[in-house]
Amino acid sequence: MQHPNGSFLCSPSSTAYALMQTKDENCFRYLAGIVQKFNGGVPHSYPMDLFEQLWVVDRLERLGFSRFFKSEIKEILDYVYGCWTCNGISWSKDTIEFDIDDTCMGFRMMRLHGYDVNASAIQHFMRDGQFFCFVGQNSQGLTEMLSLYRASQVLFPQESILEEAKSFSSNFLRKKQELGEVADRWLITKDLAGEVKYYMDVPWYANLPRIETRHYIEQYGGDDDVWIAKTLYRMYNVSTNDYLDLAKLDYNHCQKLHQSEWLGIQKWCEDYNLRDFNLYNDDLLKFYFVAMSSIFEPEKATERIAWAKTAALVELVSKYFDETSVDQKKDFIQAFNYGATNELVEVILKTLSDISLEVQAVHGKEVYPDLKHAWNTWLMNLTIEGDNDLVPNNEAELLVSTINLCAGHSSSDGLNSLPEYVSLTKLTNEICNQLHQTENFKVGKQNNCSDEKFDSIDLKMQELVQHTIKISNDEVDKETKRTFLTVAKSYYYTAYCEPTTIDNHIAKVLFQEVV
């Protein structure tokens, strides 16, 4: 029971009782050290290094400004990874009483950051088909089940323990929602019910960063969050108004930039007379919103704007091709490649020129030939005759290529010919094509698609997640691979969420200032 640091369960009170009974020198050394550290008082438990650091990273990421602390986050996760065991982790490196809350938070964080962690650690907390926070417990708390649910969604293929964890935790959370019992035994926070609702309504595959941040800023309690143990206590490294104030400042700063970009995209639409091609403002707004919610950082404006414009032009060309003959399609491609007169082709070529000039200014690279080649590849695919449900659209490939080119990559890097890149392209095209069909089905039927449709897509998403977030020695760099997942998640979002939900998100995320 006694830990290497001299404590019992890292508990000052338990250790003090043991000292009174045994006069153990290690107990005394532990207590004397923390009394000195905390200037005469002691916390209810010490140390809580793993818990505190993991929850700090979680808060920074959900509040939307973790990009300012990349090196610090890597240092934290390296430390946690060094403490990882086959049975998970505890709240402290000095504690061997592993718990599901810290294990799931650590597992999720490290997996998303590319560390090699095995999901079998979660098996340690399962008994008779149920999951518990500690081995030997007979009940569950809400926040640990939320941690389990969030962790279960970053599964790789064949990880059955995470499938079981997802089923159990989602059923547990939904039942608590139905009973109106969304309260926790460990934490008193501002809006736990809102957190649970968001994650139950929006699966991780459909969870776009800016949408999550906008909701979490309203749910985060800052200084008012209180933890429950032997006494009520606060953790100011985890819950602090400093984080909240910084999150609001950063969010509103980014939002003003995004609103300015939206005005610029509307001007682009007007300058090129895209209304004449039946490009509606609502559709244009949706294209920009999805791009902005996926890639929100100010320094990535080139990628974001190019994504939105490309998506809009893809929509126009797809509609045009749906209404034209094979010969007319070939004439269109001929005009695209050789400069023959076609109004829509002229818009595309001028837009590609605009994008390439912006990339040249930001990255010093000429990408116009590569952009045009990516478009030609997509256009040629559109001429394939057959059932639209069977012939892939491959617009996801075009979006990924555009985003990567705007990030400063080029075909001269040899990227597109690498086997891993080719494999990721094929898988992403398959996923996004299925999701696109699902979205069309939903709109046509005016209701949600069956869960079976998403179940089949989820299996491929598991494979994509594994290939894009796991750090390897392959030649395709991490950021490039993540683009495939980013685009796939954007398709999942539009296919999964109802149009009214998307409209509400647009109003809240893009136009409502955080106060």
Image: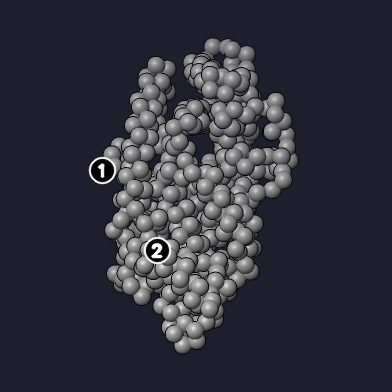
Residue that mark 1 sits on = 515
Q: Amino acid at mark 1?
A: Val
Q: Is residue 117 above or below residue 228?
A: above
Quarter occupied by residue 142: bottom left
Q: Is residue 415 above or below residue 182?
A: above
Q: At 29% across and 69% down in the image, what residue appears?
A: 180
Left or right: where does residue 366 sit relative to residue 294? right
Residue 456: % across, % down: 57, 56
Q: Residue furthest left?
A: 515
Distance from disc 2 to disc 1, alpha carbons, whole Å, reads 35 Å
Q: At 72% across and 43% down in the image, what residue appears?
A: 474
Q: Nearer the viewer, residue 499 or 150?
A: 150
Circle 2 residues within 10 Å: few <14, some 14–19, many ≥20: few
* Residue 208 appears anywhere in the view: no
* Residue 363 appears anywhere in the view: yes
Which structural element holds mark 1? loop
From the image, which quarter does the C terminus lie in? top left
Which structural element holds mark 2? loop
Q: Nearer the viewer, residue 221 or 274?
A: 221
Q: Which mark is residue 486?
A: none
Dot placed on the residue nearer the N-terminal end, 2 or 1: 2
Residue 233: % across, % down: 34, 66
Q: Nearer the viewer, residue 101 or 493?
A: 101
Q: Amino acid at mark 2?
A: Phe
Residue 393: % across, % down: 58, 37
Residue that mark 2 sits on = 38
From the image, which quarter does the N terminus lie in? bottom right
Q: Is residue 255 above or below residue 448?
A: above
Residue 390: % across, % down: 61, 44
